[in-house]
Image (cartoon, grey):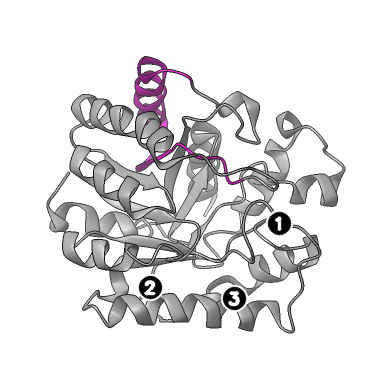
Amino acid sequence: MTDMADWRPMLIRRNDGFPRIMGVLNLTPDSFHKASRLDSTESAVSRAIEMVGQGADWIDIGGESTRPGAAAVTVEEEVARVVPVVRAVRKSLPSTCISIDTRRATVASEALDAGADMVNDVSALSDTEMAGLVAQRGCPICVMHMQGTPENMQNDPSYEDVVGDVRRSLGEAVSALEELGIDPSVIIADPGIGFGKTLEHNLSLLSSGREVVPDEKMPLMWGVSRKSMFSNLLGRESTDHRLAGTLGVAARAKDKGVDIIRVHDVEEHADMFAAMGALR
């Protein structure tokens, strides 16, 4: 999908008010949810086709784990993991929206060349080349807040006012993009649940909904799927036991003005939104 008119409506919530579903495609051996790890192009394409059939609007392809404590991989390794998969998914699903989950402009560029539509940058422009790349390509970008890096972000994170601090930080990235002529309607804000936050920080950000968005024209994305907040909140140490908590938070996404929700479990989220919509 390369036409802006095709993917722009996919950045905002559905007509019924429920968020678009972004399915996670992990090409990493160390992602925090073991069941989501994929080790070949063939298995990744099969999983992407399955997720689209279950109701995914977006496929988010990543080749570097950003779980707490994760070490960075080389650019070459990340490119080798994701680019063949982006190309193969685009060939198999020509009309599906594809996002590349990367902090690096070089990886983003090659993924966009291979058929990706959007950049999902968990570091909110830590690579100084990323803003210029996005402006040049005319593609949407998601900027996510992270305090620190994956290696150290959970080492005693602190804020004066987590909602205000995250909004201001995201606003700096948005300003840099706007200075290059990028419209805020194609810049997605993600508060970065679990990225340099305690449980209390996460709950405050989720409760705030769109208060964290720097510009009212911007879409809002949540990524809460099976994260460690459910270990702290519910005592669920294994990621295999965090689906119920994930769905409990996702059930509030419509009321909180969320446009896109990034998940491991597409079918369960699609079913929940359908059931909720029927009752309303």
Placement of the N terminus among the 4 image quadrants: top left
Depth check: give the residue in front, 112 or 271: 112
Q: Which mark is residue 21?
A: none
- Residue type indicated by callout 2: Met
Classify residue 52 as left or right of residue 166: left
Residue 105, x across and y down, in percent: 33, 55
Left or right of 83 on screen, residue 268: right
Residue 51 lies in quadrant? top left
- Residue 49 colored in magenta in the image: yes
Q: How crowded is mark 1: few (under 14 residues within 10 Å), some or many (20 or more)?
A: some
Vertical side of 23 occupied by 160: above or below: below
- Residue at image mark 2: 218
Type of amino acid under label 1: Asn
15 to the left or right of 271: left
Q: Name the residue under label 3.
A: 166
> Marks 3 and 2: which is nearer the front?
3
Depth check, front residue: 172 or 16: 172
The local secondary structure at tag 2 comes to loop
- The Cα–Cα distance between marks 3 and 2, rounded to whole angstroms, is 15 Å
- Where is residue 181? Give x, y as percent: 21, 78
Q: In this view, does 126 lie above or below 181?
A: above
Q: Can residue 149 be seen in this view?
A: yes
Going from N to C along the chain, the mark reached first, 3 or 2, is 3
Q: How far apart are marks 1 and 2 (CA)?
A: 29 Å
| Dot in front, 1 or 2 | 1
Residue position marked by numbered label 1 in the rendering? 152
Residue at 62% over, 43% down? 71
Badge 3 element: helix
Which region is colored magenta? 39-66
